[in-house]
Image (cartoon, rainbow, N blue to C red):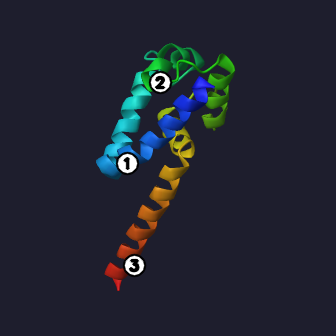
Amino acid sequence: MAASNNQSEFHDFLPLMAEKLGGDGLIGELCNGFRLLMDVDKGVITFDSLKNNSSVLGLQDLSDDDLLSMLKEGDFDGDGALNQMEFCVLMFRLSPDLMDQSQVLLEEALELEFNNSH
């Protein structure tokens, strides 16, 4: 039960970061998060590096199965680890509010670009 509480707090945190930091700042923070969780020697997030560093994100209460599920959900190339792009995509997918917000920002940018070109 504690893990889901931590997770919901984490979900609420990303949109707040996006609001305060803007798009570029948020990407920078996600990159910092990736570096905190990655295996320094391999340059990717492995199960062991995620487990050893999960407390950084307040995820220390997650079970091994939960951590493995998180890795599998984000592992698009099937190598059993998360590279930086996979990690960032996973973080956006875990935050529905952030996805909604980024869709709105994209639409605004496209509309602005369209209006400027005419």
Q: Which residue is mark 2?
A: 58
**Up/down of 97 relative to 31, above or below:** below
Looking at the image, the residue that sits furthest to the bottom is: 118
The residue drawn where x is 65% and y is 17% is 64
Q: Which mark is residue 79?
A: none
Determine the image quadrant of residue 25.
top left
Q: If you read the primary sequence from the N terminus, does the residue marked by circle 1 or circle 3 appear first?
A: 1
Q: Position of residue 60 (x, y in %)?
A: 53, 18
Lateral position of residue 117 relative to residue 65, left or right:
left
Q: Position of residue 104 (x, y in %)?
A: 46, 64
Q: Is residue 48 above or below residue 98?
A: above
Can you identify the residue that label 3 sits on? 114
Residue type at mark 1?
Ala
The mark closer to the camera, 1 or 3, is 1
Q: Quadrant of residue 79?
A: top right
Q: With respect to residue 53, does 93 lie above or below?
A: below
Tag 2 or tag 1, which sits nearer the N-term? 1
Residue 77 visible to an observer of this rendering: no
In front: label 3 or label 2: 2
Q: Quadrant of the N terminus?
A: top right
Residue type at mark 3: give it: Phe
Q: Nearer the viewer, residue 115 or 66?
A: 66
Q: Please tell me whether mark 1 or mark 2 is closer to you in this view.
A: 2
* Disc marking residue 18: 1
Q: CA distance from mark 3 to mark 2?
A: 42 Å
What is the distance, in whole Å, between disc 1 and disc 2 at their CAs?
Answer: 19 Å
> Residue at point 52% right, 29% down?
6
**For the residue labelled by badge 2, is the local secondary structure a helix, a strand or a loop?**
loop
